[in-house]
Amino acid sequence: MKRFVFDTADTANVTDFGNGEWSLNLNHQITCSKLVITNIIIPHTFYNVNKSNNEMKIVSITKPPLIGMVIETIKLDERYMNYNDLESHTNEIDIGGVKKIECTFNKKTFKWTFKRLLPEIDSIEFTTSYKLYGFKKGINYAFDAITNEVVSPNVADMNSIPAIYIRCNQIHSKCVYNNNRTSILHRLPVDKPFGQLITYQNTSTDMFINQENINYLQFSLTDNKGTHIDLNGADWKIEMLLLD
């Protein structure tokens, strides 16, 4: 029995082919007959915003004498944390009586846009969340020189999808469709609200490996029609057991 973790954040062992296709390198040939899923984690959108993870740095990186200096570390107030209260409109971040950044959330695209109001602000950095608002932690996002904006790059939108189908090319599962066994490992209902994680914990279902000796497992996410789901860069994870 061997335990494996497929995590798209693991760029050393996971190859992203784009269009909802990934491959997990097992690093050596595995001989097995069955696979058991222990848990699955997929983001509904970006991770939940709360009091502990909404901090960001406003940074200057080019203008002397402030090169590389953190001008301000701020936390957004609670009005930015509740999706139900957010519309497609702009709020200004006022620090010490000075308006420094405009913050816009678009409900249709699930994109956040931050616009600088002061020229000495060159970038922003999110410091306390892995994917706050669709941004990665610890990366300086530079404002565009023309638009003065930074737009969130990684946003997953599951609102129009009732369920996610996790598939693996090397496996015949116990899931039967049109009287045939399929490559579907699991049907995961999209049953969590905006900003949370869609999760699955193990039942004792086994999936059967198509071939005994394998070097990699190829995964994909689709909807019920077989159309690939675009997570727009958000990471997802499966933990599994390969059984002899």
Image (cartoon, rainbow, N blue to C red):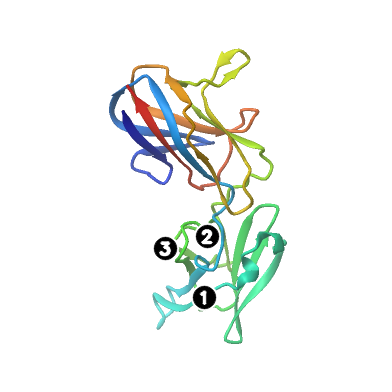
Q: In the orientation shown, which residue stands out farthest toward the front?
A: 204
User: SS at mark 3?
Assistant: loop
Q: Nearer the viewer, residue 122 or 180?
A: 180
Coordinates of residue 141 in the picture (x, y in percent): 48, 63
The C terminus: image quadrant: top left
Coordinates of residue 78 in the picture (x, y in percent): 62, 70
Q: Nearer the viewer, residue 202 or 113?
A: 202
The N terminus: image quadrant: top left
If you read the primary sequence from the N terminus, does the residue marked by circle 1 or circle 3 appear first? Answer: 1
Coordinates of residue 160 in the picture (x, y in percent): 69, 42
Contact flag, marks 2 and 3 (Cβ < 8 Å)? no
**Which residue does the numbered mark 3 point to in the structure image?**
138
If you read the primary sequence from the N terminus, does the residue marked by circle 2 or circle 1 appear first? Answer: 1
User: SS at mark 1?
Assistant: strand
Q: In the orientation shown, which residue stands out farthest toward the bottom?
A: 97
**Which residue does the numbered mark 2 point to in the structure image?**
132
Determine whether 24 is above or below 103 in the image.
above
Coordinates of residue 59 in the picture (x, y in percent): 46, 74
* 3D distance between C-alphas at marks 2 and 1: 14 Å
Q: What type is the residue that disc 1 sits on? A: Ile
If you read the primary sequence from the N terminus, does the residue marked by circle 2 or circle 3 appear first? Answer: 2
Q: Residues within 10 Å of mark 1 (few under 14, many from 20)?
A: some
Q: Residues within 10 Å of mark 2 (few under 14, many from 20)?
A: many
Q: In the orientation shown, which residue stands out farthest toward the top?
A: 179
* 3D distance between C-alphas at marks 1 and 3: 15 Å
Q: What type is the residue that disc 3 sits on? A: Gly
**Which residue does the numbered mark 1 point to in the structure image?**
74
